[in-house]
């Protein structure tokens, strides 16, 4: 009977071990599934966060490029304005020079006209004035006879 009890005890132990093992395996599988799901969720969140960060970086880079382009455009506008101002000043100076040259040429022409008019007046006066006759040399008196 001892043998039967020992065999029965062993059978019960084997049955209990088998039941415990099955329960343990089931719990382990559930825990593993939970862990896998959590890891998957974490990986998805990490990927999403990385995508968000990349998008933010791209947006910041785009904004920075836009600001840089705006600054370059502003600088170019300032340069263009300065160049226009310089060109206007040069044109004004050239205009003044041309006006001064024209005035000088006008003055010279007026002086020439005045001189020509003066000459013409003098010429007409000379022509109009009666010609002076040279006094004829009087015949020398005959030498007096020596007395």
Image: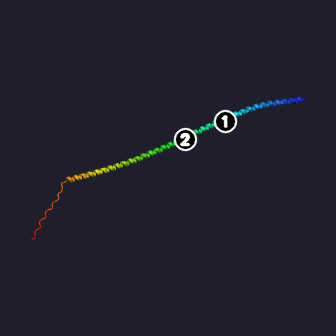
Decide which of 131, 48 is in the foreground and name it.
Answer: 131
- Vertically, is 113 above or below 17? below
Judge left or right: residue 87 versus residue 115. Answer: right
Residue 4 image point, x, y percent: 88, 28
Residue 8 image point, x, y percent: 86, 29
Q: Residue at x 27, y 51 (%)?
A: 116
Question: Which mark, residue 33?
Answer: none
Residue 52 image point, x, y percent: 61, 37
Q: Residue at x 31, y 50 (%)?
A: 109
Q: Badge 2: how crowded within 10 Å, few (<14), some, or many (20+)?
A: few
Display colour scheme:
rainbow
Q: Residue at x 33, y 50 (%)?
A: 105
* Residue labelled with disc 2: 65
Report the quarter where the C terminus lies. bottom left
Judge left or right: residue 6 versus residue 78. Answer: right
Judge left or right: residue 126 versus residue 71. Answer: left
Q: Badge 1: how crowded within 10 Å, few (<14), some, or many (20+)?
A: few
Judge left or right: residue 6 versus residue 93. Answer: right
Decide which of 136, 65 is in the foreground and name it.
Answer: 136
Question: Which mark, residue 43?
Answer: 1
Report the Cα–Cα distance between label 2 and label 1.
32 Å
Secondary structure at numbered mark 1:
helix
Residue 54 image point, x, y percent: 61, 38
Query: Residue 145 falls in which quadrant of the image?
Result: bottom left
Secondary structure at numbered mark 2:
helix
Sooner in the amino-acid sequence: mark 2 or mark 1 = 1
Q: Residue at x 68, y 34 (%)?
A: 40
- Vertically, is 10 above or below 65? above
Residue that extends furthest to the bottom in the rendered view of this protein: 147
Residue that extends furthest to the right in the rendered view of this protein: 1
């Amino acid at each position: 009977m001892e043998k039967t009890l020992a065999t029965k005890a062993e059978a019960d132990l084997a049955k209990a071990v088998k039941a415990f093992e099955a329960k343990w395996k089931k719990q382990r599988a559930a825990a593993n599934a939970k862990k896998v799901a959590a890891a998957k969720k974490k990986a998805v969140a990490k990927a999403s966060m990385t995508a968000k960060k990349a998008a933010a970086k791209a947006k910041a880079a785009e904004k920075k490029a836009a600001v840089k382009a705006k600054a370059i455009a502003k600088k170019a506008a300032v340069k263009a304005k300065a160049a226009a101002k310089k060109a206007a000043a040069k044109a004004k100076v050239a205009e003044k020079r041309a006006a001064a040259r024209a005035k000088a040429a006008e003055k010279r022409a007026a002086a020439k006209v005045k001189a020509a008019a003066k000459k013409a007046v003098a010429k007409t006066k000379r022509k109009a004035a009666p010609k002076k006759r040279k006094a004829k040399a009087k015949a020398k008196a005959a030498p007096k006879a020596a007395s």
